Image (tube, coloured by chain):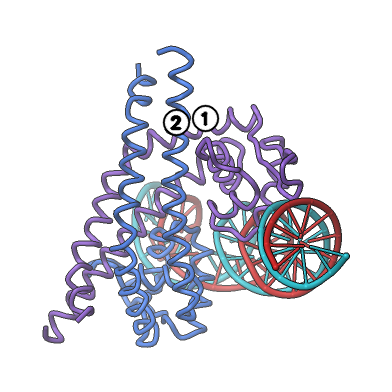
Chain colours: A blue, B purple, C red, D cyan
Amino acid sequence: MNARSSSLQNHSVLRSLADFRFELRSFLCFSEQAALRAGLQPQQHQLLLQVAGAPENATVTIAYAAARLGLKHNSAVELVDRSEREGLLERIADATDKRRILLRVTRKGDNVLHRLTSEHARELNVMAPSLMAALEHVRATAHFTNDAEAR
Amino acid sequence: MNARSSSLQNHSVLRSLADFRFELRSFLCFSEQAALRAGLQPQQHQLLLQVAGAPENATVTIAYAAARLGLKHNSAVELVDRSEREGLLERIADATDKRRILLRVTRKGDNVLHRLTSEHARELNVMAPSLMAALEHVRATAHFTNDAEAR
DNA sequence: TTCATTTATGTCGTGATACGATATAACTAT
DNA sequence: ATAGTTATATCGTATCACGACATAAATGAA
């Protein structure tokens, strides 16, 4: 591969990655605005979603929330503090392991979350095609580049 | 639809949405860590990506960057300030419209960006399947819910 | 048992950064 | 000419994620 075609190819990877990130950011913007309109901080929405949307068998602790949100433990503690103060969530002592704190979404939190959830489902039905197309396009443009570099 | 099946369906939407957001967050975490390892703030990486990855015909101004990053204009100004101070980017006066500032990635910025870009392309080849699957699953679970609500 | 280690949560000070409000300069159109 | 609009810039504020540290409970090894 000569320098010219390599440079052209690099730019097409940059472009497809930029477009993908733009699509992603658009979705996240929508989500943040929807949360704020519903009276939640975007991160509070994410916390409620991960707590209420956890699998039946999961132990929903602070550490679980931190892992699902990609946060350090202490950041999760603070997020739970703020959410509990607003009555969206409650801490429940775990009888089997007194170090742990189990999290449960309150009725109030559940109500807000359900409204946000259907709003998100609707919006994703609209945005998913362009999001997936952008992601596919990254893979299409990046594929050969990766192959070449692997040699 | 009775209350029981509706509640079950609600939970499956919650779960698929939670999983999708977790996959998304995982990718974003990877991206942030990669940027930091490369010596950039995550947002600086995004700025470089949008500037360098813009279509040939685009006028890459502060406003353009703000729109692509989902930021207010002033936040973009500050992000450009920080990036310019570190020599990643430069402001170029636009001769045809003296209000505008055109943005250009420096060689230094380009070098960092290219390393990050191939790292991202590789990682996306790994993560894309689960990301797309999670998104598909949201659409699958949310589809009927939306139909029902539309009536 | 006893005591070191690990795990889970909590506290506090700090730093980064996105924003609203406001300002200034340049372009546009009537 | 000038009113209105557009593009960038400045500044004070608030949020929030983090590192460092602290506490309490569980675990494991001697």
The reply, left or right, for residue A126 in relation to residue B39 is: left
Evaluate if marks 1 and 2 touch, with contact meaning CB atoms under 8 Å apart: yes
Q: Which residue is mark 2?
A: B118
Q: Residue at x 71, y 35 (%)?
A: B87
Relative to A144, is B94 on the left or the right?
right
Q: Quadrant of residue A69?
A: bottom left
Q: What amino acid type should be assigned to the residue bearing mark 1?
A: His
Cα–Cα span, label 1 and label 2: 6 Å
Q: Residue furthest top?
A: A2
Which residue occupies 40% across, 51% down?
A: B26
Residue nearest the observer in this picture, B83 or A82: B83
Compared to residue A49, the image places residue B69 above or below, namely above
The quadrant where residue A5 appears: top left
| Residue highlighted by disc 1 | B114
Percent across and percent down for residue B78 are: 70, 53
Residue plotted at (49% across, 66% down): A76
Q: Is residue B41 visible?
A: yes
User: Is A8 located above or below residue B33 in the figure?
Assistant: above
Quadrant (top left, top right, bottom left, bottom right) of the C terminus of chain A:
top left
Residue A10: x and y, percent? 46, 27
Q: Residue at x 38, y 69 (%)?
A: A61
Quadrant containing the N terminus of chain A in the rendered view: top left
Residue C23 locus on image (x, y percent): 85, 66
* Chain for disc number 2: B
Considering the numbered disc 1 on the image, is that residue within a helix, a strand or a loop? helix
- Label of residue A131 in the image: none
Tell which subunit mark 1 falls on. B
Can you tell which quarter of the image residue D10 is in?
Answer: bottom right
- Give, as a three-letter code, the residue at label 2: Ser
- In front here: A91 or A141? A141
Q: Please tell me how crowded label 2 is: few (under 14), some (14-19), or many (20+) other residues with Cα within 10 Å.
A: some
